[in-house]
């Protein structure tokens, strides 16, 4: 078994124009920095990006937005990115906004082999337009579909050569479900170790979900809202 | 005197009970954490994957991998746990969170809430708000009662909805109101604010029964 690739360039080498890609992270926390840079350099276009947020103007997915490599964005909250809002309001960028929990579950469902499910979020709002609604236990629910992607690109704190992943603090966020959901899942990690070095009791994402893994470099880990107590 | 943001937060904090799991939205709701009454322990849930959120860090303890749902750097308290977003929303959708406190642009007399979009002007996205309002056992909205003399407590929301018939209680700069089957029931008024003033700035049906006490801030 060899899942280890040399770097981000090698990991993304078969990502083509028009691919649908899930990107892990919440805001700028736990984002696959190396792969985003590599995708920018590869100049792949017309991407459909699935990510909770879209970075900020000059970092995270905002980088691929600025270069107009993203055709469609599926997200839940995009408030931090002025360029995103501009492209969306002008119609240059196609956007599908999902309630955050629905987005998370649509991704989880794909990895778990569940084609559709019902949730109450969004019933009676514009999110429900065109969706099947059904009553369960006296409450209305919307049918939501699993969300598929050609690739999932995730970031973990530690990983091993079998693809097992461990996240740090709140950097797990969407990474764990996306790793399960990608047809091909690429994981970049801050620390890559030989199989057997991570405690199996501590693994968050079992290696079965990960096809490629590499040791990332030069993590900037930019902070979006530096807030300190006095 | 109308309440300032901190006073609204302080009044909402009086609704917290010992042992509550609490989700605080961005803005005024975040401030509620500063006013948890003495002797009460609540556990804060941040939907990006943290239960047991603590204070803001010091410059020395800042960690880019440790943020809240507003993307602010935070710390965690003893007994905290981290988890992915699907698990986080299982807590929310599954009804495990006791109380949700969030902001709003508008609330209707039937408890509908608008908080995520102003068509053609502002689109930030709903984030976790739709999931929270659809499933929380108890929802308190923190908001301004009016904007430039225009009521934000309406018969019907004018902006795109976040959820329908879900808001239970509202704390504004002028009043505390319960959302009842017949409309907004005035429960308390801000110190020095008259019932008439509240009435004039409430477009939706306002129920006034007996003497309305002043809030104790």
Image: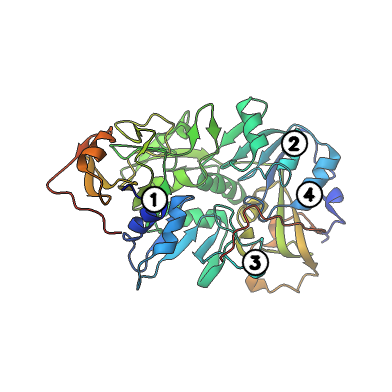
Instruction: Where is residue B119? Give x, y as percent.
Output: 50, 28
Classify residue A65 as left or right of residue B104: right
Marks 3/1: CA–CA distance: 29 Å
What residue does disc 3 label?
B59
- Badge 3 marks a residue whose secondary structure is helix
Marks 1/4: CA–CA distance: 45 Å
Report the quarter where the C terminus of chain A lies: bottom right
What residue is rendered at 46% in x and 51% in y? B25
Place residue B109 in its image quadrant: top left
Q: Residues within 10 Å of mark 3 (few under 14, many from 20)?
A: few
The answer to whether mark 3 and mark 1 are in CB contact below 8 A is: no
The answer to whether mark 4 and mark 3 are in CB contact below 8 A is: no
The answer to whether mark 1 and mark 2 are in CB contact below 8 A is: no
Marks 1/2: CA–CA distance: 39 Å
In this rendering, which labeled residue sits more in front, label 1 or label 4? 1
What residue does disc 1 label?
B4
The answer to whether mark 4 and mark 2 are in CB contact below 8 A is: no
What residue does disc 2 label?
A66
In this rendering, which labeled residue sits more in front, label 3 or label 1? 1
Disc on the earlier residue, 4 or 2: 4
Disc on the earlier residue, 3 or 1: 1
């Amino acid at each position: 078994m060899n899942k280890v690739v040399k770097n981000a360039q090698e990991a993304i080498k078969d990502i083509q124009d028009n691919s649908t890609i899930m990107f892990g992270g919440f805001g700028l926390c736990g984002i696959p920095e190396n792969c985003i840079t590599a995708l920018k350099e590869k100049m792949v276009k017309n991407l459909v990006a699935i990510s909770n947020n879209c970075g900020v103007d000059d970092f995270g997915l905002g980088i691929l937005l600025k270069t107009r490599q993203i055709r469609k964005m599926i997200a839940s909250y995009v408030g931090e990115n002025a360029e995103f809002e501009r492209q969306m309001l002008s119609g240059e960028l196609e956007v599908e906004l999902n309630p955050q929990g629905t987005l998370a579950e649509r991704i989880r469902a794909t990895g778990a082999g569940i084609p559709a499910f019902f949730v109450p979020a969004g019933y009676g709002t514009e999110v429900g337009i065109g969706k099947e609604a059904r009553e369960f236990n006296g409450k209305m629910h919307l049918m939501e579909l699993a969300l598929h992607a050609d690739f999932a690109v995730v970031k973990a704190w530690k990983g091993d050569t079998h693809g097992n992943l461990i996240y740090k603090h709140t950097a797990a966020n969407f990474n764990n479900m996306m790793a399960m959901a990608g047809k091909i899942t690429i994981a970049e990690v801050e620390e890559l170790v030989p199989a057997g070095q991570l405690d199996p009791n501590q693994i968050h994402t079992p290696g079965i979900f990960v096809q490629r893994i590499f040791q990332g470099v030069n993590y900037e880990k930019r902070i979006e809202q530096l807030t300190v107590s006095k | 005197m109308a309440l300032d943001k901190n006073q609204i937060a302080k009044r909402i904090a009086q609704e917290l009970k010992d042992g509550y799991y609490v989700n605080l939205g961005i803005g005024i709701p975040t401030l509620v954490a500063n006013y948890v009454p003495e002797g009460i322990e609540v556990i804060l849930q941040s939907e990006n994957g943290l239960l047991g959120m603590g204070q803001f860090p010091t410059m020395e303890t800042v960690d880019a991998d440790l943020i809240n749902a507003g993307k602010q750097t935070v710390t965690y308290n003893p007994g905290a746990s981290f988890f992915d977003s699907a698990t986080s929303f299982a807590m929310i959708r599954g009804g495990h969170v006791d109380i949700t406190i969030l902001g709003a642009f508008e609330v209707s007399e039937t408890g509908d809430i608008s908080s995520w979009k102003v068509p053609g002007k502002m689109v930030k996205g709903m984030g976790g708000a739709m999931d929270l309002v659809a499933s929380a056992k108890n929802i308190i909205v923190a908001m301004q009662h009016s904007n430039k003399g225009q009521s934000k407590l309406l018969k019907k929301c004018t902006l795109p909805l976040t959820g329908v018939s879900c808001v239970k209680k509202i704390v504004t700069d002028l009043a505390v109101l319960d959302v009842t089957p017949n409309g907004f029931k005035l429960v308390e008024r801000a110190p020095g604010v008259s019932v008439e003033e509240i009435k004039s700035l409430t477009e939706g049906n306002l129920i006034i029964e007996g003497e309305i006490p002043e809030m104790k801030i």
